[in-house]
Structures are given as C-alpha cells and as structure tokens.
Amino acid sequence: LAQAHRSPLARVWRATGARGPQRVRGAARAARRAGMAAEEGLEELGEDGLDGLEGLDAELEAMAAEEAEGMGVDEGEGLLLGSGELDAEEAPEEAPDEEEVPDEEPVDMEALEKEAEKVDSSIVAEVAAAEAEVDEEEDEVPDEEAAEIADHLKDAVEGSLRLKRMLSRDQEEMSGGATKKRKVDGDEPRPIIQAKVRQVLAKFSSTTDALMKHVLDQCTVEELQYLLSGNFVPNRFDIKRTAAELTAQHLFQQRERKLGGGSRIDVVSAFRLRWNLGLDAEKTLRSLSHKDLRYVITTFDGSATLQEAIDEAASHVEDDENTQSACPNGPGVKVMSRFNRLELIDPLADCAVFGDANLTFAMNLATHRKDFGHVGRVIATTFEEVETLRERYPEIDQSIKMLEEHHAEVYHGVDCTRIALDPRFEGMEGKLGAVYYNFPHSGAIQGFFDSNPMVNWRHENLMRLFFRALRSFVKPGGVVKVASNSGATGVRYSFIVGSAIENEFLHTETMPFMEWHLHRYGRSYGDRRDTYKRPDAKNNQSYNAQNAAADMVYCFSYAPTGSTLPKQQIRLPPPLKVLAQCRDGPFKNLPPGSAQRALLAKKLNERFIKEVSGTHVG
C-alpha cells in the first residue's frame, strides 16, 4: 500500500473516489506499468487539478485502513499489493507535498464523494487508459507463430506459446536484454497466497529454499491451508529426494484422492465418480442391460433424477443398424467394457496416433481397421524426424511402407501440443473420431528423477496442452485413449485424467493395458536407448522398465458444452534464478554461485525452450 500510495497514478485513483480491494490492486498494477507516463499526465492537469487532490490523503488512508479490515487480513500477514508490502503495524509514508490532516479528525464520507465528483473527467480517463494498457500488454502475443494461426485455432496453441515466451523472457532477463517483468498466468501470487507461503516456509524450516518457494507459489489457498493445518512436514534429510520434491509429491497425492485411483475403473464406477452418486445408485446401474445402461450414461445430464433417466431408457428403441446396439439385452457393464477393449470405433471417422516412435502401434491399428472394414484414415505421427528414426529402428522404412499400403498417412516431427500450427493438420478440425497416445513422456533429463519439480512441470504441461489442442480436432463423441503406468511419477495418472476433464473430455473407463486388443506391439523407450536396448520387438518384450500389471488405458469421450473455456492453466517452469540454486541432480556437486551453475542452468533453459517449440531433443 505504501508503494501504491506514493505512486503518481495512485494519487489519480484516490481522486476518483474509487474504493475496494480490486480497484486498489488495479491501480497498483497500473502504477507500476505507467511509470513516468502517468507523472507527465498529472503535470498536464495544471494547478487547478492538483489543488483538488490536496488534503485528501490522510482521509483516504483512513479509508484504506477500514477497507483492509473488511478484507479480513490476518494480523501479522499484512496486505500485499504487487511488489509492495505493508505490515500491520506500519503506517504509509506521506508525500512531502501533501497537507497533513489530524488523525483524530473524523472522515466525512459524503463530502469526500462530492469532492471526488468535482475532479475533471480526464483523470478518470487517465486511469482507465492506464489499466487498459496493462490488460492489452497481458494479452499481447509477440510470438511470430501466433500471427499465422487462424482465429478459431488460437485457443488450441495459446498455452504452448505462452510457455515459450515465459522461458525466453527468463533468458533475456538474465542477459540484461529484457525490461518487462516475467508475468504469465498468475506468475505473481495473490497477497493471501504470498502470506501463507511464508507461513508454510517457516513451518517447514525452509525460508531460504528457493525450490520449495517455487512449489508453494503455485498452490491454491486451500492447499496451503491444508499444509498449515496438517501434520505433514517433509524430511529434509531424505537421501533420495529434496524437501520440495517430497512436498510436491504429497500435494499430488492429495489432489488424486478427488479423482479416484489410477488403476481399473469400469464404466459404472467412472459414471458414479463423475456425478458423485451413492452406492445404491451404482448398484442399480450395474443391474441394467446394455441398451439401458448405454442410454443412461450417454444422455444423463443431471437435469432429471437418475430413476427418471432409467425409466426413459426402458422405453427407448435403439437403431438396429448402429454398432452400439449389439447385444441390447446383455449385461451392461460387461458389454460396454468389451466395446472399449475390442476397439469398436467409428468406421467412417479418421483417427490419429501421436508419439509412436517405431510406428508398431500404428501398424497394429491400421491392420485392425482394415480387418473390420473401416474406411476412415489412420494418421500415424512421430515426434522425431525420419533421419533419427532410421538410426534407432533399422526397420522403420519397411514399417512406413506397410502403413502406406494400408492407406495410412505418416507424419514425422509432430508435436501433439502444437498441431494447430502444423500445416499438415489443416482442414482436420472436428474430423478425428479416435486419438491414441501411448505412454506419454517429455523426455528424461540426466540426474533428475521424473518427479523432481525442476523437470516435472514438463510432464504435467504435456497433458494439459495435449488435451487443449485436441479440442479443435476431435469431433463431439470422439474417443481419446492414453496408455500409461498407474504408478508413473513423470506423467502421473492425475495429469492425464485432470487435464482431460478440464478440457471437456469425459472419463469413461480405465482398463488394464494387457486386456486391450491393441496391446501387442513393440513398445520402445522413444529416445537414444532404443539404439542399443531392443532385445526383442515382438510380443511386447522390448520394454520392461515398468510393471506391466500396473499399465492402464485411460479412456475419454469428447463432450463439448459450447461454452468458452478459461485460458489454459499451465504449470510454471522454475525461473533461471531458481534453477541455478538447485541442490540436486546435475547441480549437486557444483559450488553455490559458481559460473558452472549459471551455465548449466542456461543450457537446461535452452533445452526447455526447444522442447516447447516442438524441436526434438535427445
């Protein structure tokens, strides 16, 4: 408040009579952005305009104190606005050119409002223009790639471009070339979060741990309160993981309790979790026939009772020519589960496979669709370019030839989070009836566990940006299947399910990978290890780094509501300054503050920029 009180534009705000914490924060932000421009604007007001501002400050300070009490700020926490802080016992400094008003003088609110109305309307316009300038700067997209995107596809790639700008701006700031503060997607935590973060840091005895602060800064108020009130305290002497990594893992586990487990969930259990139904309702659903259960799951929207939906399903007549009408009187749960496992997808719609390094899964899918007489295309994609694939997989040219014989299309160098920027996907909006992404991973970084907060943000953003990109290309009712290990610490199952749900993909089932009709393909690592560690690419024996019993297929159905979704949330990467203070991984044996640390941090940042730009690394 002291900084906002002293700033030139804040004086303009006070004269307008605006009140409330939202206007306070808006004026503080505008003041920081406007700088000297605001001061020049005040000089143009002349003596008459400034005379109207004199003598109001002490009264407005009393108003601010009353408003701060109304905001419910805890004692000792203070009220934070942007980069300025005001402790509960500190008083704001007064500007030297302002008249003092005795503290005991009562505030005449009516007179104050009348005085504010007399201020020239140009002052109000100055405030609005400054705030509009801030909002315009926040929405600015300086990336050249953004200019080439059609308006209806900008939302599909906005998060990826925002992440790239954030990483690039970090590097510019370290080199002294950037003048704008890094500010993307809540990069500056709210005052209440800042206060609670300090409390948690004190509780964990981690007030100097930059990585712990980075983890806590991205928590919600509820999560911070949970850490404050709970008994969890990270073990700072753990030999494998840092306190920040243990805290992040604990928070992930807390969030995952709301999503159900990462292992087998059948169609009824998934439906019950979606609508928060009781055990009696679940028992009733499990007793329904295939026809009735499919109708209820497909049409129920909460506007009527579940029993009314069941009664309506009994009188519904299914179309006999539809594949989904098979076995109408069979047990509902069993028949619907068989549909998912047998991969009975739309025979007319195109389907896409992302991240299929050696193309063996795409070959399996193309053969499956040909045997079933499907006419929809199979679009097989790899993240690597074909030259890299030839070094790792000697049989890759033969695999491409086989796919082309099955009328499939093969695209190399495809980033599944940026398909809106790929000209090869032009015109495919709303055309994909099925999408597959098996065992997604953002790539290992030597020295770091996948769960380390320094690198784990890449895995979470991979899923968030992937599902946001699919919204523009999957048709309503289209299916998306993502295979992953339920115990994975890189791409956690909660990243997959949570990202799908927030982008209007309904979680329909989680089935064991080994029960899937398409599970027999030659899995690979998808990196340079495939050059020397492929003992047998048949019978799924080429990859044994995870427990096969824990491999799952997470199934989703796209159900857009037609409403505009908020801007895609992303997990913020660590700033270069935080990265250079890392105490584990490749930084473990480097002296603090050394040039080697700064160089390694810069190299990692450059790799992150390449990854979010769709460039293959490693």
Image (cartoon, rainbow, N blue to C red):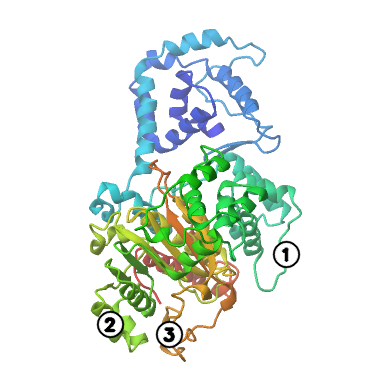
Q: Kindly give the residue lying farthest to the right in the view shown.
A: 231
- Name the N-terminal-most of marks 1 and 3: 1
* Rendering coords of residue 512 (x, y %): 55, 71
- Mark 2 and mark 1: Cα distance apart in space: 54 Å
Q: Nearer the viewer, residue 188 or 485?
A: 485
Q: Residue at (54%, 83%) from the top-left corner?
A: 544
Q: Residue at (41%, 88%) from the top-left corner?
A: 531
Q: Rate crowding at label 3 as few (under 14), some (14 to 19) or many (20 or more) other CA atoms within 10 Å.
A: many
- Mark 3 and mark 2: Cα distance apart in space: 21 Å
- Mark 1 and mark 3: Cα distance apart in space: 37 Å
Give the secondary structure at mark 3. helix
Q: Residue at (64%, 59%) from the top-left corner?
A: 253
Q: Nearer the viewer, residue 575 or 400?
A: 400
Judge whether residue 464 can be spotted in this image.
Answer: no
Disc 1 or disc 3, which is closer to the eye?
3
Residue carrying label 2: 402
- Name the N-terminal-most of marks 2 and 1: 1
Locate the N terminus and report the quarter of the image it occupies: top right
Q: Rate crowding at label 2 as few (under 14), some (14 to 19) or many (20 or more) other CA atoms within 10 Å.
A: some
Location of residue 609 with respect to 99 vertically, above or below: below
Q: Which mark is residue 65?
A: none
Residue carrying label 1: 235
Q: Quadrant of residue 109?
A: top right
Residue carrying label 3: 530
